[in-house]
Amino acid sequence: MKLWKGRFSKEATSSSNEFNASIGFDQRLYEEDITGSIAHAKMLGKQGIITIEESELIIRTLKEILADIEAGKVEFTIEGEDIHMNIETILTERIGQTGKKLHTARSRNDQIALDIRLYLKKETAEIDSLLEELLGALKDLAEKHQETVMPGYTHLQRAQPVTLAYHMLAYYQMFARDRERFADCLARIDRLPLGSGALAGTTYDTDRQFLADELGFASVLPNGMDAVADRDFALEFLSCCSITMMHLSRFCEELILWSSVEFGFIEMDDSYSTGSSIMPQKKNPDMAELIRGKSGRVYGDLMSLLTICKGLPLAYNKDLQEDKEPVFDAIDTIKASLGIFREMIVTMKVNEDKMAGAAKYGYMNATDAADYLVQKGIPFRDCHEIIGNMVLYAINHSKALDELTMEEFKSFSEAFDEDIYDAISIVNCIKAKKSEGSTSFASVAKQLADIDKA
Ligand code: ARG
C-alpha cells in the first residue's frame, strides 16, 4: 500500500511502479536512513511534538529494524518505492499508529538529502584512508629508490636524468592534494539539510541544531529550499573522484609503458597481470589498463549528475533520484581502483639497470653541457647553439656526449676542459641541481624529510 495513496483513485500499474522505484539501488542507504530517523524521532520527542514514550518506541523499533536488515531478515519491496517508505512501512507494521507519527515535520526531500550527505561523509573518510595508504606506498618506493637513476621525459622524449624517487614523489604530491580536495569538499558536505521539510520549512517547533549535534554535522543549512534542491556537494565529491582517477590513470599509463619490452623499467607481479587466450607469451598489465579505463566511467558519473541538475527548477524534482547511481558507481570504482593500484605498485619489480641504461643515452646531459659553458662565461643562448651542434655531430657519429674526445669537444668551443667529463656524467647532472624542489639527491632527501614533518 502506498503511503501517499490518499489523493489517488487508481492504483499505479506494475510498470510505473517499477519505473518509479529507487529501492533497487537506494537500499544501500538503509543505515543512514535509520540513523536520520532516530535523530528525528528523538528531536520530535524532546520538542513535545510526539510524546517521549512514542519517541522511545519508534527509536527502539528502528534499531530492531536495523539489526534485522543487517541479519538479512528484511525484504524490501518495489511497492514501498524507496528506502524511506520501505522502512517507514516496516516500522508501522511493527508498532501501528505510533509508527505513522515518525514522518511529522519531515519530508522525503530533506530525508534523502540527509541520507546522501551522511553516506558521503562516511565514504569520504574511507577514500581518504585509501589515499593515505597509497601515499605510504609511494613514500616507501621513493625512499628505496633515491639512487635509482632514470630518464625524465617531456613529450615522451628523453629530457633530463632524474631519480625514480623524484618521479614517485611527483605523484605523492598529486595524491596528497587529492586528500586536501576531499577534505575541502567534506566541509561543504558536512551541513545539515534535515528539518527543511518538502521545500518551505515546517509549522512545527523543531530544533535543527539539536539534529545537527545528534548527527554530527558541523552546521545547519540556512535555507530549506537550497537544502532540498541542490546537489552541488555531490558534484564536488564526484569531481574530487574524477581528479583522483585522472591521477591514477596517468600513473597507470606510465606503468603500462614501463612494463613494455620497449621500456622494460618495471615488471608487474604475476598476481596483478593476466595472460592471453591465444598468445602464450603474453603478460598483460590489465589492472593498470582497467584503472585507466575506469577513469572514463567516473568522469561519466560526474557528467551525468551535472546534466541531471542543469535544467531543474527549484526545488525538488524527481530527476534528483537519478543522483544516486552515479555517486555509488564513482565510490565503488574509486575505492576498488585505489586498493588494487596500491597492491600493484608495492608488488611490482623495478629494473634499476634498465632505467640507468636508458638514462645513459638520449643526450639528456646536453642542458648540463650548456650550463658548463655558461659557467665559463658564454651567454646561455650561444651555449645552447654550440651544444645543439655538438649533439648533431654526436648523433651522426653514433656517440654519447661523454664519448667525444677532448679534441672533438675543443672543435666546438675552446672553453671545454677535461672537467667536462665529470660535469656531464649522469649522476653529476642530478647532483648539480640546486633549485628548491629539484631532482638532486639532497633535494629529494629533503622532500622526503618534509613529508615526515608535515
Ligand atoms: N526516492 C526519492 C529520491 O531518491 C526520495 C525523495 C522523493 N521525494 C518526492 N517528493 N517524491 O530522490
Image (spheres, helix red, strand yellow):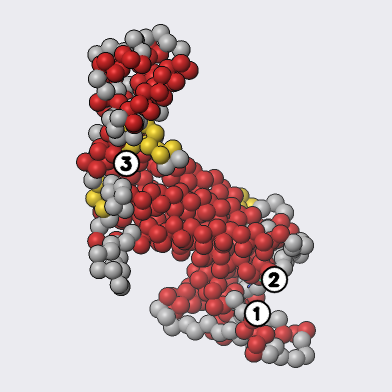
* Amino acid type for the residue under numbered disc 2: Lys
Q: Nearer the viewer, residue 164 or 85?
A: 164
The quarter of the picture showing ligand 1: bottom right
| Badge 2 vs badge 1, beta-carbon distance below 8 Å | yes
The number of discs equals: 3
Question: Mark 1 is on which residue type?
Answer: Asn
Q: Which residue is mark 1?
A: 20
Q: In the picture provided, is 414 more to the left or to the right than 197?
A: left
Considering only vertical position in the picture, is 225 above or below 12? above
The residue pinned by badge 3 equals 139
The reply to whether residue 35 is visible in this rendering is no
Which image quarter is the N terminus in?
bottom right
Residue at the (37%, 37%) spot, across then down: 158
On the image, numbered disc 2 is attached to which residue? 318
Provide the secondary structure element on which disc 1 rests.
helix
> Mark 1: few, some, or many residues within 10 Å (few <14, many ≥20)?
some
Q: Position of residue 430 (x, y in %)?
A: 31, 27
Whole-percent x and y of residue 146? 27, 34
Question: Ligand 1 near label 2 (Cβ, under 8 Å)?
Answer: yes
In front: label 2 or label 3: 3
Which callout, 2 or 1, points at the residue further toward the start of the chain?
Answer: 1
Labels 2 and 3: the sequence-earlier one: 3
Q: Earlier in the sequence, mark 1 or mark 3?
A: 1
Other-residue count near label 2 (Cα within 10 Å), few / some / many at <14 / 14–19 / ≥20? few
From this viewpoint, is residue 304 visible? yes
In the structure shown, which secondary structural element does the residue marked by tag 2 occupy?
Answer: helix
In x, y percent, where is residue 282? 28, 64
In the shown orientation, is residue 368 left or right of residue 87?
Answer: left
For this view, does 296 lie left or right of residue 358?
right
